[in-house]
Amino acid sequence: MNFFDEIFQNSDVLSRMKIFKNITKQFKNDYVVFDIETTGTSIYYSEPVQISAVKVCNGKMIDKFDTLVKPKRPSSDEAIVVNHITNEMLISAPSFQEVYYKFKQYIENFTLVGYNIRRFDLPLLNTRVKGLIFRL
């Protein structure tokens, strides 16, 4: 189950999304709402296993980005319980490097919006991107 499926199946999430909808009314520009599922809870050691996003222009969803990501290390049992993404599901997924460049193009020039992105998702991406740069 990905982030967007969860929104429609969990009333607690629906409550949060009503609040989110009110918050996003303040955005004058178009924006991308995104979420990242990971192998664990550390921004330094966890790896993305799914990146999901939607583009919103003039208050309407115009595009969707959703992909699994093959990590270098297996997901923890705790992560699998939370995100329902098993290690078997990731065997044929593209690498982070492949996904990152596509995601970067997708979000370019858009305001980024999401739950806890400042404390988790963006620092995690930053850590992973630094790893790509040092390996080139």
Image (cartoon, grey):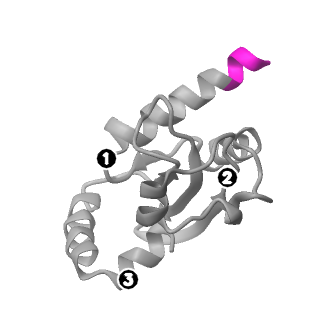
Query: Callout 2 environment at 10 Å: few (<14), some (14 to 19), or many (20+)?
Result: many
Tag 3 or tag 1, which sits nearer the N-term? 3
Q: Which residue is under mark 1? A: 116
Q: Position of residue 51 (x, y in %)?
A: 57, 55
Q: Which mark is residue 48?
A: none
**90 and 105: which is toward the camera:** 90
Relative vertical location of residue 100 with respect to residue 23 in this rendering, above or below: above
The residue at which mark 3 appears reads as 8
Residue reaching furthest to the top: 134
Which secondary structure class fits the magenta region best?
Answer: helix
- Disc 2 residue type (three-letter): Val
User: Magenta span covers which residues?
Assistant: 132-136
Q: In which quadrant will I find the C terminus?
A: top right
Residue 135 or residue 81, whichever sits in front: 81
Q: Could you tell me residue 107's position as x and y percent?
A: 57, 47
Tag 3: Cα neighbours inside 10 Å, few (<14), some, or many (≥20)? few
Q: Quadrant of residue 82?
A: bottom left
Question: Is there a contact, CB below 8 Å, between mark 1 and mark 2?
Answer: no
Gap in angstroms between the C-alphas marked 1 and 2: 20 Å
Q: Quadrant of residue 134?
A: top right
Residue under the point 66% across and 60% down:
67
35 in relation to 118, above or below: below
Bin the neighbour count of mark 1 within 10 Å (Cα to Cα): few under 14, some 14-19, many 20 and up: few
Is 48 placed left or right of 43 in the picture?
right
Q: Earlier in the sequence, mark 1 or mark 2?
A: 2
The residue shown at (75%, 57%) is: 93
Residue 113 rendering spot, x and y as whole percentages:
38, 51
Report, in whole angstroms, how far the alpha carbon at label 1 lies from the one at label 3: 19 Å
- Could you tell me if residue 57 is visible in this image? no
Please indicate whether residue 12 sits to the left or right of residue 81 in the image: left
Q: Which residue is mark 2?
A: 69
